[in-house]
Amino acid sequence: MAKPKQAQALPEPLFQRMAVLGLGLIGGSLAKAVREQKLAACVVGADLRQDELQRGLELGVIDEAAESLAAAVSGADLVVIAVPVRAMASVLTEIRPHLEKNAVLTDVGSTKASFVTSVEAVFGCWPDRVIPGHPIAGSEKSGIAAARTDLFNNHKVILTPSETTNSGALSRLSALWSACGATVLTMSVEHHDEVLAATSHLPHLIAFSLVDTLAGEDDNLEIFRYAAGGFRDFTRIAASDPVMWHDIFLSNREAVLRVIDHFNADLSVLREAIEVGDGKRLLQVFSRAKAARDHFSKMLSGQAYVTAMSQKQVTFKLQPGGDVRGDIRVPGDKSISHRSIMLGALSEGVTEVEGFLEGEDSLATLQAFRDMGVTIEGPDKGFVRIHGVGLQGLQAPRGPLYLGNSGTAMRLFSGLLAGQNFDAELTGDESLSKRPMGRVADPLREMGAVIETADGGRPPIRIKGGQALKGIRYDMPIASAQVKSCLLLAGLYAGGETKVTEPAPTRDHTERMLQGFGYRVEREDATARVSGGGRLTGGHIDVPADISSAAFFLVAASITPGADLTLRHVGMNPTRVGVINILKQMGADITVDNEREVGGEPVADLHVRHARLKGISIPEDQVPLAIDEFPVLFIAAVCAEGETILTGAEELRVKESDRIQVMADGLAELGVKTTVTPDGIVIQGGQAMQTGTVNSHGDHRIAMAFSVAALRAKGEITVTDCANVATSFPNFVDLAKNVGIRIEVEGAGG
C-alpha cells in the first residue's frame, strides 16, 4: 500500500493531542495517517460504537480510546468531528464546555453551511479557531476496518476559513492535511456547497435513483446481470452509506435543489429530442459534453475545485550545443485554426477542418462555440467537423466564455459577439487578464456596441446583447490584425459598410477566409471593407503549418553549424513572411520549394541550412509581418556579426509579455548586453551566451526562443514558467528533441 506523501520531515508533532470524534472511514483514516506520520503526539478516538472503538485500538488506528466525548476533547489541541452532518449540533453542544481555549476545531463533513450554522448556534459566534474542512476522498466501504493511511494521498481537502480565522491555526491544520498526502485548497463556505452539490451530491443522487428505479423493473435480474462496466462504475457510489447521504442532502438542501432543477431541465430537452427524433440536438449535447470533459480536464490540470485555471510550474532545462537536422511539419497555424472554428460556426452547412491546431488557445475557442450551441465533432488528430448555425444562430452561453491565454480569441470574439441578441462575458487566465482590450472596445462602441471592461480596459469584457450596430470608417492608430479582424467580424452584423484602414500591412487571414466562405470582402490599398447582411457557406479548410512555429526552427538551423532542415507545408501568406524576409536579409540560407495554394492560403516547403548571419537595421515595413517572431529573431541577432537594430515595434510591448524588455532581461541573464528603446532594441552580435536562468514570464514565445538560444550557449540554460508553450505549440519539446535540441522538461506531470 502506498504511503502518504510528505513534503518534508517534521521535527516535532504539529499537535500534542488530536481527538477524532467518530471512527468511520474518514475519521479512522485520518487518525491512522496522523499516527503513522507522527503528526500528533497522541491520537485519541471517541465513538458511540464501543466495538469500533476497541477495533481502532487493536488495529493501531488510535493510541487511546476515550470513554466519552468530553474525555476525548479534554486537553486536546486539535479536535476533528467526523460524525454524520446532522449529528454535528449535538456533538458540538456536548463538547463545548470541555474544549481547551486554544484548541483547533474542524470537521470532515460534505456540507459546510450547516456546520457553520451549528457552530454559531452552539458558540454564539464563529470562533477564530473553528475551521470547517472537507476531504474529497472516500470509498463505498465504511467503518474502522476500512481505514487506510493513503486514503487522502493525491486527493483534495477543502478548508473554508472565515475572514477572522486564526492564521496560525489555519497554517497548522493545512500542514497536517498536506503531510497526510492531500492537496489543500481554500474557498468560501457558500462556494464549497454550490460546487459540491454539482460535482458530488448530484451524481450520488442520480446513482441512488438509477439503481432504485432499475431494481423495480420486472426484469431487474437480467438488467443487473448484463450491466456493462460503465454502469457498475457509475452506480458503485450507490453502495455508499444511506444515513450519511440522507443527512448530506437535507443539510445542503438549497444548493442541491438548484442543481437538480438545472439537471431536470436539461434532461427534459434530451427526452424531447429522443421523442421527436432530433438527432442534431442529441449530437450537439453529446459532443459538447464529451469535449467539455476533455477540455476542462486539460485546462484545469486536475484542479477541479479551483475557480480559476491553475498553471503547472513547467521548467525547460537545456544543455548547450546540439545538431539541427531532419524533415518535420510543425503544428497548424493558430490564427487560421481560430478563424476556421469561428467562421465555420457562423456559416450555414458543415465545415470540415484538417490540420487544426490542438493547443489550449484553439481548444478554448472551440469550447466557447460549443457553449453557444454549436455542434462540433473532434478534434481527432487535427480533424474537426463543425455544424454551422448561421450568423444569427448562436445561443446565449450559460456563463462566461473562458478563452485561456488567447488574445486573438478575445479580440475576435468581442467583434462577433457585439452584434448578438444576448449578453456575453469573456474571461481568460491571469496573463490574458492583464492585456489591454481598449483598442477593440473603443471602436466597437463607435459602432453602437455596449461594452464594459475592467480597470484599464482589461478583461473581463462584458458585452450587452441586442444592440443595433452601424458600419464605421476606422483608421487604426497601430497596425493590428486582431483589431482589424474584430471590426470586420462586427461589420457582418452592422448596418451599412464597415471600412478598416491599417497603417501597415498585417495578416489577412480573416479577409481570405471570409471570401472562402462566400462572404464578399473588398480590399483597396490599405483599406478592407465589408457590408452587413450577407451569409457564410460552410466548406473545407486545410490549415497550413504555422510560420510562427516554424520560425523557431528556421533560426535554429540558421545559427547551428552543419544544420540541414526541411519544414513541410508552411503557410506563406504574404502578410506573415516577414521572418523569412528578415532572415534572408541577414544572410540566411532558406530555399522555398513546392509552392502551392491550399484553401486560399499559399503554402510551401522550406529548406534551411546553416549560414553566417550579419546584423541589419530591420526595415519597418517588415515589422508587422514578423511581429510574433521577434523573440527568436533576437536570438539570431545575438549570433550574427555586427549590429541589429529594431524600431517601430511598440506592439511587442503589449503581447503576452513586454517582449522587448523580457527578452532583454533574459539575454542579460546569459551575459548579453542590449540597448532597449521605447519602440525596439539594439543588439550587438557576436556576444557569447553563457549559462543562466531565464524567466519567460509565462510567455510561450519567450520560452521557445531561449530553447533555441541553447544551441549556441556556453553552458546550461534554465527557462522557467513554460507551461503556456502548450497554448501555441503542443509538441514543441518533442520536435525540438527530434531535430537535435538538447531539451528536458521538469514539472510537466500531473
Image (cartoon, grey):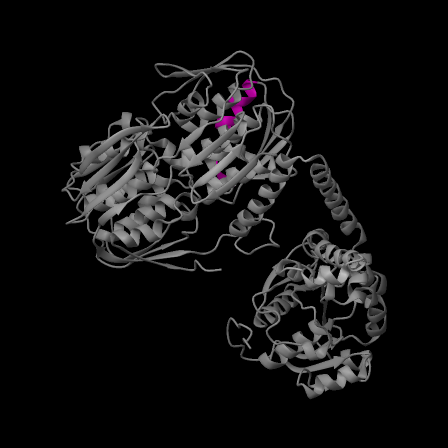
Residue 691 placement (x, y as % from top left): 26, 57
Q: Is residue 680 above or below residue 246?
A: above
Q: Which residue is drawn at 27% across and 44% down?
A: 553
Residue 262 placement (x, y as % from top left): 73, 43
Task: Give, as a single range, the part of the protein colored magenta.
Answer: 433-447
Residue 152 in view? yes
How many badges with numbers are in the image? 0
Residue 281 placement (x, y as % from top left): 64, 36
Residue 363 placement (x, y as % from top left): 49, 42
Q: Nearer the viewer, residue 737 or 180?
A: 737
Q: Which of 223 and 350 is in front in this view?
A: 223
Q: Residue at x 19, y 34 (%)?
A: 584
Of all residues shown, which one is farthest toward the top?
496
Residue 438 covered by magenta stretch: yes
Q: Is residue 303 above or below residue 554?
A: below
Q: Residue at x 54, y 25 (%)?
A: 348
